[in-house]
Structure formats: C-alpha cells, structure tokens
Amino acid sequence: MTDHLARRWSLGPFKRVPAAREATGQAEGHEVRLIKPQTYMNRSGAALAPLQARPGFDPATELMVLSDDFALALGRFRLRGAGSAGGHNGLKSIEAALRRQDYARLRIGIGPLPAGTRDSADFVLAPFDRDERAALDALLDPMAEAVECWLGEGIEPAMNRFNNR
C-alpha cells in the first residue's frame, strides 16, 4: 500500500533512513512521509524515532499506521482513530515507542485465520495466491482515498465515509 501511495502522489523513490525506508513530498496539500520499517515486525516502533524527534509531533493527528489484520476478511479494510494493538506485534512495538494508543490506523484484512492454524505468523508470512492478490489489489485505490480523506478532513470523517463500505 505504501508503494501505491508513493506512486499515486509522485513522491519519488524510497530512501534509507535509520530502521526504515521513506519517501517524502506533498499529497493533498500536506507534507507527507511514508515510512516502511526495515526491522522485524516486533521492532516496528524504532522507525518512528525521526518523527518523535520533531518538535510538536502529535501522533493523534499526524500518524497513520497501515497494518495487516487476520481478524478482518480478505478484501476489507477498516480505519480506527485509537485502540489497542489487538495482539499485533508491530502495533505493540509502535505503542511502546509512542507510549500512547491514540494514532490513526488502517487495518487491512487478510483473514480469516484458517481453522487449525497453530502459529498465526505462518499464515501472515505466507505469500498470497492469485485470487487473494487480486482482492488486495482491488482495495488499493479505495484505501488510498481513505488515507487522502484522513489527510484532508481527519480520522472521524474518514471513518464515517469508508468504514461502512
């Protein structure tokens, strides 16, 4: 999804920064920074250090985290303005780094977890088959529109507009 946003917004290539790769530029009249952590998932919060070093950085209004979610059906997504990590190790790391839970998140459905799965990591790390990939590709533009709505109007209007689809 971050690659799709970078192309859609003509941001240019992702560059190496500590613990991540990032692309910066303008989108919807706002300065944006797309960050792809280059750590293990359970250390994703390390990629936020440059943001946290900025004076006045407010995760509640300036941060949206995109994450997979096997509790959501494949082909669905949901926006949230705050909440718990819900067992997601990447979100746990981010919340530990921020010391708060009030940041926007875009949860991208990859579920359901198949019956009998003993280790959810095996499921989450498995490649998508052709039909699954097609379902996720069909979400790229609607998710980008949701992110753009969040940028321009905030999380509440974005949730109202996109969570009911």
Image (spheres, grey):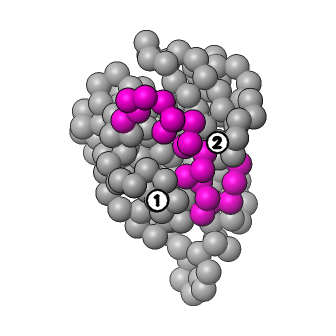
Q: Amino acid at mark 1?
A: Ala
Left or right for 131, reference 101: right
Q: Amino acid at mark 2?
A: Lys
Residue ID for mark 1: 96
Q: Residues within 10 Å of mark 1 (few under 14, many from 20)?
A: some
Quadrant containing the N terminus is: top right
Q: Residues within 10 Å of mark 2 (few under 14, many from 20)?
A: many
Q: Position of residue 130 (x, y in %)?
A: 70, 53
> Which residue shows up at 67% across the image and 74% down it?
122
> Which residue shows up at 30% across the image and 30% down it?
154
Which residue range is magenta in the image? 38-58
Left or right for 46, reference 79: right
Q: Name the residue nearer the viewer: 58 or 133.
A: 58
> Which residue shows up at 61% across the image and 59% down it?
43
Residue ID for mark 2: 36
Q: Which mark is residue 150?
A: none
